[in-house]
Amino acid sequence: MIMSAVDSTFFTLNEVATAIWLAADGATPLAKIVEGTICEQFEVDPQEAERDTNQFVTELSQHGILLVSDKPISSPPTCPETR
């Protein structure tokens, strides 16, 4: 489970969503996550995987859980408690 700090929305992650979450490192493009993680680990059509992954990532980003960018993030954001 993950929760949005913005609006307290909970998301229960299935195996595919967990694989996406773990692969979202701020440096790997989403297309590579779909191709190299989702399609390799799960028997799924690449177009369907891309569509579903985009929908999942969009939903998480709308709730402030995941940051989406067109270029790699140079350093991962830190939590205020860890600074």
Image (spheres, helix red, strand yellow):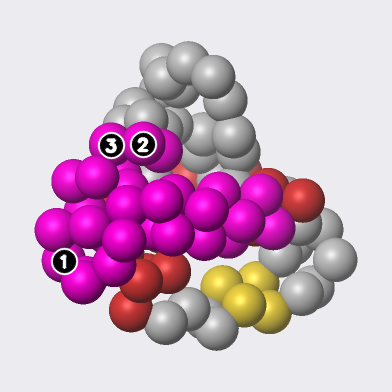
> Nearest the camera: 38 or 64?
38
Q: CA distance from mark 2 to mark 3?
A: 4 Å
**Residue 52 disc label:** none
Q: Quadrant of residue 20?
A: bottom left
Does 52 sit above or below residue 35? below
- Residue type at the position of mark 1: Gln
Question: Helix, strand, or loop for circle 1?
Answer: helix
State which tag comes first along the sequence, 1 or 3. 3
Type of secondary structure dominating the magenta stretch: helix
**Residue 78: where, in percent of width, then height?**
51, 38
- Residue type at the position of mark 2: Ala
- Residue type at the position of mark 3: Lys
- Range of magenta residues: 30-59
> Nearest the camera: 45 or 56?
45
Q: CA distance from mark 1 to mark 3?
A: 13 Å
Q: Quadrant of residue 38?
A: bottom left
Give the residue at mark 3.
32
Q: Residue at x 48, y 45 (%)?
A: 82
Question: Helix, strand, or loop for circle 3?
Answer: helix
Could you classify mark 3 by the number of other residues whose Cα lies within 10 Å: few (under 14), some (14-19), or many (20 or more)? few
Give the residue at mark 2.
31
Q: Residue at x 48, y 78 (%)?
A: 13
Q: Residue at x 32, y 52 (%)?
A: 46
- Say whether residue 50 is visible: yes
> Nearest the camera: 81 or 37?
37
Give the residue at mark 1.
41
Q: Decide: marks 2, 1 in contact (CB < 8 A)?
A: no
